[in-house]
Image (spheres, helix red, strand yellow):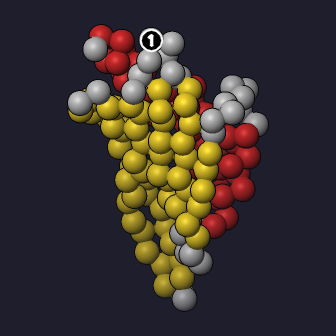
């Protein structure tokens, strides 16, 4: 359990988020506020991105999963940040998307050290947050 707690703490720091440990699974809630414009109306909402890892092995690898909401204009930057990160994507990496005109939900999963998954996600979040400030 001590290894799980240490990894959870590191992941929380990387993602600047609170972590919860529950039955051998680490749950991370990362909040993000976005502005959505649709049909001449604009509104602001805060989204919870669900990020987790479970089944932490002695090798340091775990099953990592994330559900991330993006604006359509953020998708390319986010995915490019994941693919071009200095830590290469593992062979087990997968992602799929649910797309509608106003928001995209990206589901990510991989089996790798949770710190690697979190580091990659953190950079991708930073890139889209910086571009939204421009």
Residue 94 shows in this picture: yes
Q: Which residue is mark 1?
A: 58
Q: Is residue 30 above or below residue 56?
A: below
Say which of 129 and 109 sits in front: 109
Q: Is residue 128 above or below residue 111?
A: below
Q: Is residue 91 above or below residue 29?
A: above
Q: How would you rate the neighbour count of disc 1 (Cα within 10 Å): few for under 14, some for 14-19, many for 20 or more? A: few
The residue under the point 73% across, 40% down is 83
The residue under the point 35% across, 43% down is 29
| Image spot of residue 115 (x, y percent) | 51, 24
**Callout 1 secondary element:** loop
The furthest residue to the bottom: 39
Residue 115 shows in this picture: no
Quarter that holds the C terminus? bottom right
The residue under the point 39% across, 58% down is 47
| Image spot of residue 70 (x, y percent) | 55, 60
């Amino acid at each position: 359990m001590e290894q799980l707690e240490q990894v959870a703490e590191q992941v929380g720091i990387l993602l600047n988020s609170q972590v919860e440990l529950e039955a051998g699974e680490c749950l991370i809630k990362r909040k993000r506020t976005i502005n959505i414009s649709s049909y001449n109306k604009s509104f602001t909402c805060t989204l919870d991105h669900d990020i987790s890892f479970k089944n932490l092995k002695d090798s340091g690898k775990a099953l990592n999963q994330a559900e991330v909401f993006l604006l359509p204009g953020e998708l390319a930057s986010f995915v490019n940040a994941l693919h071009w990160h200095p830590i290469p994507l593992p062979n087990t990496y997968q992602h799929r998307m649910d797309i509608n005109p106003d928001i995209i939900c990206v589901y990510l999963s991989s089996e790798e050290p949770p710190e690697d998954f979190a580091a990659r996600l953190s950079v991708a979040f930073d890139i889209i947050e910086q571009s939204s400030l421009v």
